[in-house]
Image (tube, grey):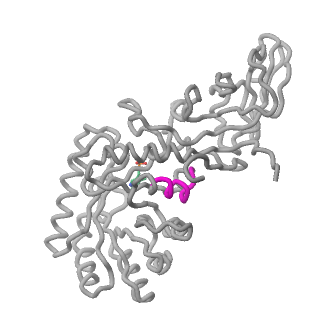
Amino acid sequence: MNSPEPQVETLVDLDAIAHNVRILIRHAGEAAVMVVVKADGYNHGAAEVAKAALAAGAREIGVTTVAEAVALRQAGITAPILCWLNTSDVDYANAVAHDIEIAVSSVAHLEAVAAAARATGRTAIVTLKVDTGLNRNGASPTEYPQVLDLLKQLVEAGTVRFRAIFSHLALADEPQHPANDMQRARFLEYVATAKEYGLEPELVHLANSAAALTRPDLAFDMVRPGIAVYGLSPVPEISDFGLRPAMTFRARVVLVKRVAAGEGVSYGHEWVAERDTTVALVPAGYADGVLRPLSGRIDIGLRGKRYPNVGRVCMDQLVVDLGENPDDIREGDHAVLFGGNEGDPHPQEWADLLGTIHYEVVCSPHGRTVRTHIGGAA
Ligand SMILES: *Cc1c(COP(=O)(O)O)cnc(C)c1O
């Protein structure tokens, strides 16, 4: 009761998630939308995001591991859940017991899933992951016939239900790149080969966010967006598609004080005040996800305006130059590190400064950061 607001927090707006899902549904046309909530929903909270997305019309959920999938079932999600990145010795029995759809990329994976089905006395739901050119996960063309042989036996024995075939694109963020067409062609070959074995998938899917928004010809039966659900454009140079960033990363000012001209600020004195000034101390540092290479390069949002971070970002804190503090910033005010509101620093700005992508930026807040969901049914 009456506990103070967290000093450093992420606010995740479930209304923004719902808005973004509706945009994806419009782009998907006839195809269903599977919302990808791996890595704890790209650090937005997997269960909360999944529920908001399903309420907005998404049909299925995608994650990487069995543990992520089972946690969503335990959180009360009854929609289909697919997981696609597990070693053969994972607890597949737990997945089968929870009706989790399991993607297999090899004979070894499929044998392990079959053993789990026999052990639990339940039918396992299997999806084939095929490698169409990303050369990462997925069955390769050389191993594919053995996988199909085994799958056919297991389907005939009633050990597994064959749900889908899917693959993942390598250059979807370059929508016109010929690799996308090559992967599409190879994908169709894999599907045709399965049919030659008498294996008819219930559905096939290929598109991530970038393809879902730019390549309707790759939608097939379902699209699998991740980043766009969270409101970040996979192709920012093309469009923002009306998406709304769902995450705000912010901290509360702990101290406002004057610093005299000629004084150095923060470790190493890399910034020296040229004039008497006012600074605000923000209790968020690299231990919370404000990466140190951002030192002295980012702006912080305070009362709707942007002020520069000065000096090094430390483990727990950073300093902001307020000048003569015209807006009367005070202890307790919210300092926005990045967010989705008009005027907020955008995760893309951090990505540009860091030479990375906004996916990594929204995955950064951690440590003392407290996550709170707003909007939706939160
Ligand atoms: C992460 C992932 C997605 C979602 O990708 P986005 O670029 O975030 O839309 C889709 N499919 C697979 C297999 C993935 O690993």
Q: Residue at x 23, y 80 (%)?
A: 152
Q: Residue at x 31, y 77 (%)?
A: 161
- Residue 87 locus on image (x, y percent): 46, 71
- Residue 85 locus on image (x, y percent): 44, 64
Q: Residue furthest top?
A: 275
Q: Residue at x 23, y 64 (%)?
A: 141
Where 226 sits versus 126, above or below? above
- Residue 167 locus on image (x, y percent): 31, 58
Rendering quarter of residue 238: top left
Of 346 and 173, the residue lying toward us: 346
Where 269 sits versus 94, above or below? above
Residue range highlighted in magenta: 44-53
Specify whether 224 is left or right of 175: right
Specify whether 240 is left or right of 1: left
- Residue 315 locus on image (x, y percent): 74, 41
Residue 51 part of the magenta-drawn span: yes
